Image (tube, grey):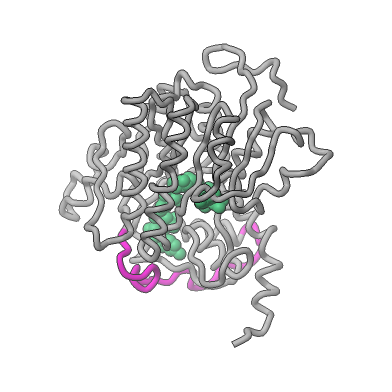
Amino acid sequence: MATAMNRVDLDGRPIRPITICMIGAGGFIGSHLCEKLLMETPHTILALDVYNDKIKHLLKTESLSWNDRIQFHRLNIKNDSRLEGLIKMADLTINLAAICTPADYNTRPLDTIYSNFIDSLPVVKYCTENNKRLIHFSTCEVYGKTIGSFLPKDSPLRQDPAYYILKEDASPCIFGPIEKQRWSYACAKQLIERLIYAEGAENGLEFTIVRPFNWIGPRMDFIPGIDGPSEGVPRVLACFSNALLRREPLKLVDGGQSQRSFIYIKDAIEAVLLMIENPARANGHIFNVGNPYNEVTVRQLAEMMTEVYANVSGEPALEVPTVDVSSKEFYGEGYDDSDKRVPDMTIINRQLGWNPKTSLWDLLESTLTYQHRTYAEAVKKAIARPSSS
Ligand SMILES: NC(=O)c1ccc[n+]([C@@H]2O[C@H](COP(=O)([O-])OP(=O)(O)OC[C@H]3O[C@@H](n4cnc5c(N)ncnc54)[C@H](O)[C@@H]3O)[C@@H](O)[C@H]2O)c1
Ligand SMILES: O=c1ccn([C@@H]2O[C@H](COP(=O)(O)OP(=O)(O)O[C@H]3OC[C@](O)(CO)[C@H]3O)[C@@H](O)[C@H]2O)c(=O)[nH]1
């Protein structure tokens, strides 16, 4: 049980309990951050979201010792006059709210741009006007494509880190043409980053910007037809989990050649807690938060997930575990992709002394154990039900 007494920051100063206004607290990252704050710190959370299914276990249970330290407010930040009052009541605002599944970027570009730029404007404005600190969640997608992706396929320079490592203060943001609407999300996130940075420079806003690099773990997204729409397309972890649960081949978009560095959600949350509790070290910075040692192609991810799932479920792997599918067929017109994402860790190391710990194999083991325990029975029942059509 955390007490206010014995916790100190990275400079040895006692950490005083604060109130945090967490927007998007009911989502994947929000649910893990709420758990961490309630179980290991004395801080209080005003949890704002339109949904609370993923934090239900933390709410309204009289017997829980943190009962008085979390309040859920069901609201949509697009149109709710309570927002400014809640930001004023808190010492710190953390903004996680967003449409952030790639299947939406090219098919719902207006909703994506409004969600990631327009809807964040009042949050930034209220923080500036009320002198409140802001931690804003951006994305690694603001880097877009690597410089190396424009070199000839056989160029040895592609192996040179100077052509692919993504640095907060040096790398350019390289997006595709406007008709590739995939980039609507990255572009909206980039513009809100620039606005927050400008508020800091011109009006003294105390801010931190987080660029998550593919955080994955339990409670990420949904399993289509079980706790989300049957036709919905979540991010890759849930897409592949869904296929494994249904014993269907995992779909590799455009051959699964894109590369990603995956980080375990629990490692990443440690970094966010350091930002929350060390404002003097975090304010004014943009932080990559990822695990450069867990880089794989999407094809390798599919192979590893197939092997790990067979171990944790006790079911044999499919004989043909993957199938290729074109991005047009899978995501529709206007899809494009980031080729490779390896975070530079210099700034977060220097400011917060943080490093990720969990290997890709270990994080998949614990995550797929959770997926199997949570969904296997429900998926079996859904498959057994005769379809209505
Ligand atoms: N998970 C990752 O690896 C990752 C990577 C890059 C960036 N991010 C960023 O981190 C943030 C959180 O991501 P996540 O993975 O937890 O996504 P998520 O979809 O699980 O969580 C977002 C939450 O925001 C809520 N929300 C959206 N619009 C809202 C509104 N108008 N009013 C109130 N609540 C609203 C949603 O209901 C949801 O619970 C996002 O800003 C996302 O862009 C995440
Ligand atoms: O069934 C599938 C689903 C996806 N892919 C490919 O996997 C790559 C990763 O896809 P995904 O995790 O869905 O998303 P991205 O990494 O492209 O983008 C996210 O990164 C961070 C964030 O900002 C928020 O989470 C979001 O934009 C990709 O190459 C897909 O094509 C697949 O092959 N099969």
What range is drawn magenta here? 311-336
Q: Residue furthest bottom?
A: 389
The residue lying toward the viewer, choosing from 67 and 292, is 67
Quadrant location of residue 129? top left
| Depth order, front residue of 239/66 | 66
Residue visible at 24% across and 58% down in the picture:
178
Tell whether 151 sits left or right of 43. Answer: left
**Residue 276 image point, x, y percent:** 53, 27
Residue 333: say if magenta.
Answer: yes
**In this rendering, is residue 150 above or below 275?**
below
Q: Quadrant for ligand 2?
A: bottom left
State the quadrant of the C terminus: bottom right
At a point 51% along the width and 67% down the height, the residue shown is 232
Please provide percent x and percent y for residue 266. 57, 39
Residue 31 highlighted magenta (yes or no): no
Q: Is residue 121 above or below residue 351?
A: below
Q: Nearer the viewer, residue 320 or 210?
A: 210
Q: Is residue 215 visible?
A: no
Residue 300, position as x, y percentages in the image: 43, 57
Q: Which residue is pictured at 33% across the width and 55% down the height?
A: 184
Q: Nearer the viewer, residue 153 or 68?
A: 68
Q: Position of residue 345 (x, y in %)?
A: 38, 31
In which quarter of the view is residue 2 placed? Answer: top right
Q: Looking at the image, how many numbered discs can be counted on the residues?
A: 0
Q: Residue furthest right?
A: 63
The quarter in which the N terminus is drawn is top right
Q: Quadrant of residue 191?
A: top left
User: Visible in this render: residue 180?
Assistant: yes
- Looking at this view, name the residue that lies furthest to the front: 81
